[in-house]
Image: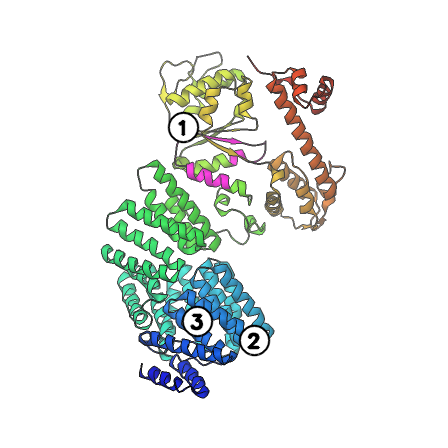
Amino acid sequence: MRQIDELRASIESESDNCDESALVAVEGILRIDPDPATWVYGSQGWFEEAAALIDLCETLLQRFAQHDKKAELSRLHGILGYIFLRLGGVHKAESHLRAAIHVLNWDLGDIPGSVRQRRRLAVVFKNLARYHQARFECEQAIEIADLNGLERESRGNRLNLAIVLIKMGRLPQVPAIFDDLEKRLDEHSDPRTSLRFNLACANVARITGHPSKALDILMPTLLSARGQLLVREEAIALEYIGDAHLSEREFRRALDHYQQAMKIAEETAPDGDLIPELCHRIAEAMVRLGDPNGAILLCERGLRVARTLSDRYEECATHRVCAMAHRAAGNFRKALRVADEGIDLGRQYEIQYELGRALVWAGELRIEDPSQTEQAHGRRQLWEARGVFERMGLSQWVCSIDRSLGFDSQEPATSESPLEAAEIGDCDRGALKFGIITSNAQICEAVEILQSVAPSQIPVLITGESGVGKELLAQALHQMGPRRKGPFVPLNCGAIAVNLLDSEFFGHERGSFTGAVTSREGLLASSDKGTLFLDEIADLPLQVQAALLRVLETGEVRAVGRDDARKVDIRIVAATNATLEDLVARGQFRQDLFYRLNGIRIMVPPLREREEDIRVLFRFFWSQLTSSGKKKLRLDEGVESLLCAHDWPGNVRELRNEVARVVALAPQGSLVGTEAFLPQLKNKDVRSLRRDREHRDVFSQEREQILVALRAHRGNKAGAARSLGGMKRTTLIYKIERFGIRPEEYQTKD
């Protein structure tokens, strides 16, 4: 404080030389070397002088502004940005750093100085959870630094970019940056950047489930930080060591290291960005050690500081730990409310890692609740978390979630796996677990809906054209829910003779009819405690519909030839490629059964509307079939474009058969071109195929309009023609013949 008073006295002498000397002295207090600007804490307790230092800097700022000294102004804005950043005033830090960058760029043309300030501005954006802005600043600064040969700034910005990507949950992109940075550090000695690089590597090792490896990196890093008097880095090293011990369930050792880090943080910046990090870490250790009330108090402090700093990442993380503390204190409902607040923050600011952890904690708590609604909510959260960690490549979390969901843990696919060879990285990973290969948003949403309703008893109706994969979705639903250990019984309702339907559905006793030489358990009874999948439900005769409705309402099955009924617990999943509402209107399907089956409606779009799935399914089938056939084939570049232009009336089934045909006929080692595919088509260029598809779409729309009109007028062609814009009756008859419209498609049963 005495040194600052002396500097103020020298400034008051109104000497320009005194102003510049004071600026150099301020940089000395903060241990800032203006070239190359290595910014560190000056000493523990420096924050006590921070107010006086800020006041002094603002006085100097006014003096330099009066004399239009641009270089000094840029240095002072940078200093103030640094001080506010370390004290937690991130918004003021952003203003000063932007001012410094403006002066350096537009008034001085100082590219190296501008790049240094952009690096610090990226740190501000990171602390504000504005990750996309932070990433942009880092990438721009790296590009400028590389163009101008600013190796030190190139290294610093690469390290900041890696840290931002870690915060964003983009872990798969980090190793490449680390490899590049490690080579640069080998070529150029940079002790502080090397130390910070080691901290980042240790953090990634801990996040990816290797706490022992993290400790091997952190122990020498801690000694190095102490040797260089880098107290902030020392605190971070202690914090990460605590994280590693926490991962190894050594809670007391974790708490000791966290408390050492907290002591440094409180002596250097008691309202700075390290405080909320350490508050929730200490609180988690305290919860594990049986002190939830103390943990709640620490979390409340951490939340106050995080909100003041607008540090959304730590606010999200603190909500999870605060929820843990409330749960340990016996307040179940408040724990879930607090956790859900953190989950909302994680979604809003794309805080992937902490979002996933909060989802896992809340989901596991909810599936223990006796309420089916809470259980369904919990499973949805676990599935969302699984997707988060799958994208991050954190297999240890994925396996843990699978166990919580009741699935057997599976080993990752080997390098020889068709799934990997098919390059289906854009697929929905949660759907992929059930063999559903898709990157289509509508299919992904359908899988999410199935995940949410899996624990319930509500019937599911899956609609879509033949071959789109309705049975695959039904099997996925069965595997997702508590019935997965029971039977999954599929039945195509249109493939059984009408006179055998009663026997197939309900079973029969020996001698109950001619040919019944033995007793037989029906499909309904054999589906007990499991799932019955009724494919093509629209083909079910009316008399069987009535009997099925009775089973759904009473849960009882009576075999043919028996007087007593058997109780069954069945989940019905139905599928159809017909419009059941139209069949109900025409009296061909029971309305009451339709309402019973239509609990949750899943609509599967045809393959022609899912070009992204055409590509990914083709790659999968191609890889799978060439691998199983032990063939090495090459593909022409235009094949995928051709396949995407075709409308695939047989959907996925047709696509797979087409790929199988081509692979079977192609000579070993040959180049497979577009001429090998779809030989039934006359015009096989992409443009003509897309034009033909558009014509078919128009054809289909007009056909549907005519059907609607005919149904509305109960088959009266004259009335239907008038409703279609005054069309002539003869024209309508011509179009009916042209479109192949059959009477049973529009006639209504009285």
Name which of mark 2 and mark 3 comes first in the sequence: 3
Q: What type is the residue that disc 3 sits on?
A: Gly
Q: Which residue is mark 1?
A: 570
* Residue drawn where x is 55% and y is 50% of the image: 426
Q: Quadrant of residue 456?
A: top left
Q: Which residue is mark 2?
A: 107
State whether residue 101 is above or below residue 680.
Answer: below
Q: Quadrant of the C terminus?
A: top right
Q: Which residue is mark 3?
A: 81
Residue 297 point in image, percent of width and height: 26, 58
Count residues near mark 3 (Cα–Cα under 10 Å), then give few for <14, some for 14-19, many for 20+. Answer: many
Q: What type is the residue that disc 1 sits on?
A: Ile
Q: Quadrant of residue 50?
A: bottom left
Seen from the viewer's position, the closer of residues 60 and 578 is 60
- Name the mark on residue 87: none
Distance, label 2 to label 1, CA atoms, is: 77 Å
State whether residue 569 is above or below residue 216.
Answer: above
Q: How is the image coloured?
A: rainbow
Q: Is residue 65 left or right of residue 321?
A: right
> Do residues under tags 2 and 1 come within 8 Å of each other at their CB atoms?
no
Label 2 vs label 3, nearer the camera: 2
Distance, label 2 to label 3, CA atoms, is: 19 Å
Which portion, as a residue range, is magenta?
445-472
What secondary structure is marked by label 2? helix
Distance, label 3 to label 1, CA atoms, is: 66 Å
Q: What type is the residue that disc 2 sits on?
A: Asp
The answer to whether residue 459 is magenta is: yes
